Image (cartoon, rainbow, N blue to C red):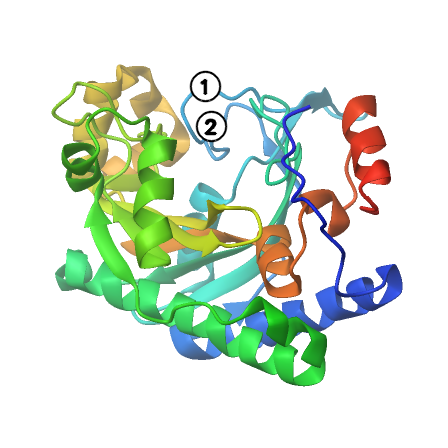
Amino acid sequence: MNSNIPEGYKSLLSIYDTQKAIGLLKRLFEDRLCALLNLYRVSAPLFVEAGSGINDDLNGVERPVSFDILRSDKTAQVVHSLAKWKRLALKRYGFYPGRGLCTDMDAIRRDEEVLDNLHSVYVDQWDWEKVILPENRNVDYLKSTVMDIVTAICDTQDTMQAIYPQLQSLGKFERRVSFVTAQQLEDMYPDKTPKERENAYAKEHKTVFIIGIGGKLRSGKPHDGRAPDYDDWDLNGDILFWCDWLGCAVEVSSMGIRVDPASLDRQLTLSGHDERRELPYHKALLNGELPLTIGGGIGQSRISMLLLGKAHIGEVQASIWDDETMTACEKAGITLL
């Protein structure tokens, strides 16, 4: 079992109040996010056709859950994320620069390496994507968008604590975002692992955005893996909040300005995935047929955990856990859904 259960932990809300609060905070946050980023809600698929190049392999190696369809010769894959699908949808809907979409994304990640307080094979998140102009493809625009997302999270926290006063004991998230590049982190903490660097920096700065994930650092290793065909590795990153009761940084969003034809061409070669150039999605992008976009995913369960003061992601989502985890959580008074 990899779960870290805080000593003396006790949920601030009953199991029913927890469910009620999750529904409320999801509505509040989505409304605030859409208002700040000018997003419009759409429906999204649970699975896509295999071989289309639309599904994402995230870190570049994850296997999707696949199945055949009885009355069709097609094979479907449960989505890992909707990064590519969203970009196609923006073109199909005719969205113009400055306008975007938001949807619920539910995924099964069978190759999740660690199942613990923060990681589950079931992933639920708000997926969003917005059309941008060529001049928006820069770090300043990325930072501005990050600050809007953090504002939406903090505004939701304020409302939730007003409705549920017992949550006020959790304190408030830091609204000011500390921006740092993955290379700067490696230079600051050369003897630490990437996760240890994140924890050390976030413990001091509380709310953090790490810029530049996917490409190799001066050490020859990337801070973390990223598939080569959705984020521009120079214009992406992760939002993290420091969680006092878990004693670690919690990543709530992976996001970024998406690849344009030039950065996709470069990253496919760097990652050794030139064969993807022949897939329909990649052909369209390399030919300049898709809009320039920024987008990302924001973890619904992780936001729920942080805003409601939960110690385990299984308190805010229904998933499958090993017997050892379930026994330990039961002994600690943690109710897994």
Q: Is residue 140 above or below residue 55?
A: below
Q: Amino acid at mark 1?
A: Val
Report which residue position mark 1 lands on: 61
Side of 79 where 329 appears, left or right = right
Instruction: Name, please, the residue furthest toward the bottom.
Output: 162
Provide residue 213's location: percent of width, then percent of height.
Answer: 28, 37
From this viewpoint, is residue 257 visible? no
Residue located at (51% from left, 23% from top): 51
For label 1, the crowd category at 10 Å Cα-Cα, with few meaning under 14, some 14 to 19 and many 20 or more, is few
Instruction: Name, please, the residue furthest toward the front.
Output: 8
Residue located at (36% from left, 29% from top): 227
Secondary structure category for the residue under label 2:
loop
Side of 95 where 68 appears, left or right = right
Provide residue 105's location: percent of width, then percent of height.
Answer: 61, 49
Q: Amino acid at mark 2?
A: Asp
Q: Is residue 300 above or below residue 47?
A: below
Residue located at (31% from left, 32% from top): 283
Secondary structure category for the residue under label 1:
loop
Q: Is residue 320 above or below residue 313?
A: above
Provide residue 3's location: percent of width, then percent of height.
Answer: 65, 32
When asked about the image quadrant of residue 320, the answer is: top right
Residue 57 - label: 2
Q: Nearer the viewer, residue 80 or 312?
A: 312
Mark 2 vs mark 1, CA separation in Å = 6 Å
Q: Are marks 2 and 1 in contact (CB under 8 Å)?
A: yes
> Quadrant of the image for the N terminus?
top right
Provide residue 57's location: percent of width, then percent of height.
Answer: 47, 28
